[in-house]
Amino acid sequence: MLSTPPTIFAFYAGLNGLILLFLAVLVTRARRKTLTSLGDGGHALLQRAIRAHGNAAEYIPVHLLLLLGLVLIPAEPGLLHAVGATGTVGRVLHGAALSLSSGPTIGRQVGIILTWGAMLAGSIALLIRAFP
């Protein structure tokens, strides 16, 4: 089922798309709740929602580009799942934690460690495969 590089990429791209969509919905809900059309109006709830979405929008494209690069090389399915799952779980944890609290939390810390770990692993794997 999820054993070919294109289907593995499609799976993680779809999940990450849903993460971004969910975080965008949280921004819209916070805007409606605070009656704030532009900016954050100084509302902590809206500030957290905007940053959670913005942070995901900054990291997810890089994560997916690295994953796509591994698909094109092509890398082994196990490596694709390792990079895809680690980055995706990292984004879920970070997004959820940042949406709920503006302070440092274990969810944010583990989330960014997983995200950076996936980026590091994907980057190194691509560089190794670029120079066989």
Image (tube, grey):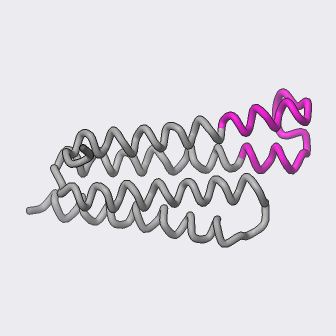
For the N terminus, the image quarter is top left
x 37%, y 54%: residue: 84
**For residue 26: magenta?**
yes
x 66%, y 55%: residue: 96
Q: Is residue 118 left or right of residue 57?
A: left
Q: Is residue 30 left or right of residue 24?
A: right
Q: Which of 102 and 4 is in front in this view?
A: 4
For the C terminus, the image quarter is bottom left
Instruction: Indicate the position of residue 36 as horizontal and vertical percent values.
Output: 88, 31
**For residue 129: magenta?**
no
Secondary structure mostly seen in magenta is helix
The residue stretch that appears in magenta: 24-50
Q: In this view, does 50 lie to the left or right of 41?
A: left
x 57%, y 40%: residue: 20
x 21%, y 55%: residue: 77
Q: Nearer the viewer, residue 123 or 35?
A: 35
Please identify the quarter of the rendering in which residue 14 is found.
top left
Instruction: Point out the residue furthest to the front here.
Output: 1
Instruction: Point out the residue furthest to the left here.
Output: 132
